[in-house]
Amino acid sequence: MRVANGVEMLELEAEAFGGRSTLCPTLIWDNQMAILVDTGMPGGLEQIRSAMEKAGIPFGKLQAVILTHQDLDHIGGIEEVLEASEGSIQVYAHELDKPYIEGTLPLIKTTAARMAPVLNSLPEDERKTALQLCENPPHAKVDRTLTDGQLLPWCGGIRVLFTPGHTPGHISLYLEQSKVLVAADAMIVYGGVLRGPVQQTTVDMETALRSLGKFTELDIESVICYHGGFYNHNVKERLQELAPQGL
Ligand SMILES: [Zn+2]
């Protein structure tokens, strides 16, 4: 879906742990380069390629991948994307999620122990594959770390917003030219409504709620949530409603 000039929301169909869902990475580009924000689940490379082709962006134009955080459904495709690129793509993430993405620490939410109830509910063959994924998740070297407030001088300016809570090193991105907020998992769209962080998947709820305050300071016209997709209805008012008062 074309969200603005140079901004495409991809919609990847993913299947994992007995469930199906649509994941929404963002593709940002200008004449010089293209940037992919998050990479879906393992096995999604062809979907990413064909979504890029449909948007008219050759895969070879990809110069950077920004991983908003360590969760498996965001970093899952990184190894395949890097392999397909022949080494020309730089990987960016926040320092606090870097060790998880690089595999020096186990991913917080999808260790085999934490996933045991889900794994045990799966049929035998699926359980094996899922367990394998939990024990050996994809990882990648993070070439550069990103900090709060940093302005990446690409594609009209990409402002990094440190929005921890969902994970310790979660970031969102504000696209200055198009006024699009790439919220990642700081918020979701559910039932057509923009909502705050999901309790079940949020490591530190209080911190996650406080992170929403950063969004109210910006001139945001539309939002892309990784789960639930695009939202552009009275965005500023809605963000004021969601952000906790007095923090
Ligand atoms: Zn997540």
Image (cartoon, rainbow, N blue to C red):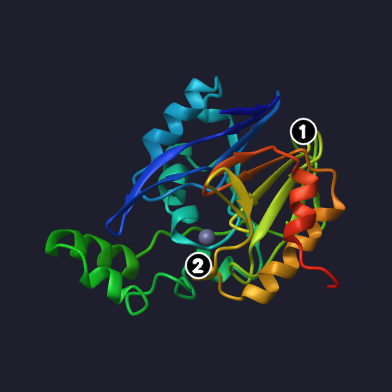
Q: Is residue 201 above or below residue 184?
A: below
Q: Amino acid at mark 1?
A: Ser
Q: Which residue is mark 1?
A: 178
Question: Would you say the beta carbon of the disc 2 residue lies within 8 angstroms of ligand 1?
Answer: yes
Q: Nearer the viewer, residue 66 or 245?
A: 245
Question: Residue drawn at (56%, 24%), measured in percent from left and top?
Answer: 57
Residue 114 appears left or right of 238: left
Q: Nearer the viewer, mark 1 or mark 2?
A: 2
The image quadrant that residue 113 belongs to is bottom left
Foreground: 219 or 57? 219
Say above or below: 29 vs 181: above
Image coordinates for residue 140, horizontal then vertical, percent:
49, 58
Marks counted in the figure total 2
Q: What secondary structure is found at the residue carrying circle 1?
A: loop
State whether residue 197 appears in this view: yes
> Outermost residue toward the bottom?
113
Answer yes or no: is residue 148 visible: no
Taking depth in this image into account, of 157 and 235 the one nearest to the observer is 235
The amino acid type of the residue labelled 2 equals Thr
Instruction: Give the farthest residue toward the left.
Output: 124
Question: Separation of disc 1 and disc 2 at Cα?
Answer: 29 Å
* Quadrant housing the C terminus: bottom right
Name the disc covering residue 201, or none: 2
Image location of residue 73, percent across then percent down: 45, 55
The label on residue 150 is none
Q: Position of residue 201 (x, y in %)?
A: 50, 67
Q: Quadrant of the N terminus?
A: top right
Residue at (71% x, 24% y) in the render:
5
Dot 1 or dot 2: first in sequence order is: 1
Residue 41 sits above or below residue 180 on the image = below
Question: Between residues 17 and 233, which one lies in front from this camera angle?
Answer: 233
